[in-house]
Each structure stands twice: as structure tokens, then as C-alpha cells.
Amino acid sequence: MKIIGWADYAALRSDFSGYGANDGPPEGFPEENEVLLAVDAQQSYEGSCVIYWQRDGKLFEAECGHCSCYGYSEKQAHGNQFSKPTEIPTAYLSLREIPYPIRQMGPEALVAWDFLQEASR
């Protein structure tokens, strides 16, 4: 698991609190042991992230973003989004353009992206 832009999984999960009736993360949000790569490219009042995880032998991707100074939590700010998790074929990773948050976070994120692509082959 590689998390870039958050201190750890707890910080990642906390950024997505406030979804649903139980104030937990949105439906489909990955558990700690499922996360393969999560990258946050926070820039002043806006931010974007991408999360990849495996669940039940399937690979998932979710892109997320916000346009406020309050973070990703739906409860705290308008305009936040956690895209519906999308199941993706592993071959897709070798064809996909490098996601924006990964390009923004530089060498560490690019190395993690390369590792994720290689692991999916």
C-alpha cells in the first residue's frame, strides 16, 4: 500500500467522513487492507485525488475532488465528490494516462504508479 498526500490510512479515511447516515466514508470506500495506491494533490482551495484498491480479486478506481477549503467531506463543503468506484480491468492500467493527482505529486507518485502498472500485468 502506498499513500501519498495523507499521513496514513486513518487520515485518508478521515478526509472522507461525513457521508451517509453514520458519518462514515461513502459507500464502496476501500478498507485499509484493500488500498493499493492513494494520491492526494491538494492545492490551496482545491484538490483532487485518485485511489486504487483490490476487493474480492477485482481492481477498483475512484477519483475524487473538492473545490473549497474544507476538504473532501461531503458534510463540510459543497462541490466535493468521491466518484462511484469503478471496477477496471488490470490491463486498463497499462493503457491509462497517468492521472492528474499522480502527475502533480512528482517522482514518488510516479514511481508508485509504475509499480502499480507493473503489478497489474
Image (tube, rainbow, N blue to C red):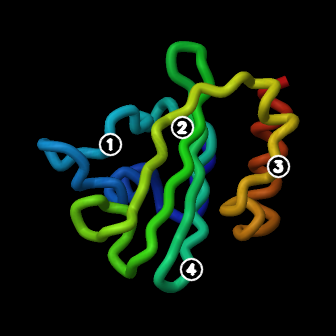
Q: Nearer the viewer, residue 50 or 109?
A: 50
Question: Distance from label 1 to label 3 (Cα)?
Answer: 26 Å
Q: Distance from label 2 to label 3 (Cα)? A: 20 Å
Mark 3 or 4: the one toward you: 3
Q: Position of residue 77 (x, y in %)?
A: 29, 70
- How far from the left and from the top, in percent, is residue 9? 44, 50
Q: Which tag, 1 or 3, sits closer to the chain's start? A: 1
Task: Give the camera-side residue of 1 and 99.
Answer: 99
Q: Amino acid at mark 4?
A: Gln
Residue 56 lies, with reference to residue 91, above or below; the image says above
Q: CA distance from mark 1 to mark 2?
A: 15 Å
The residue under label 1 is: 26
Q: Sequence-wise, which precedes: disc 2 or disc 3? A: 2
The residue shown at (50%, 76%) is 46
Front disc: 1 or 2: 1
Q: CA distance from mark 4 to mark 1?
A: 23 Å
Q: Which mark is residue 43?
A: 4
Q: Amino acid at mark 2?
A: Val
Instruction: Give yes or no for contact between labels 1 and 2 (Cβ–Cβ under 8 Å).
Output: no
Q: Residue at x 81, y 42 (%)?
A: 96
| Residue 97 numbered tag | 3
Q: Quadrant of residue 76?
A: bottom left
Q: Amino acid at mark 3?
A: Glu
Judge the density around disc 3: few (<14), some (14-19), many (≥20) Cα neighbours within 10 Å: few
| Outermost bottom residue | 44
Tags 4 and 1 touching, CB below 8 Å: no
Seen in the picture, residue 91 relative to 94 is either above or below; the reply is above
Circle 2 residues within 10 Å: few <14, some 14–19, many ≥20: some
- Give SS at disc 4: strand
Residue 53 position, x and y percent, is 56, 33
Cβ–Cβ under 8 Å for marks 2 and 3: no
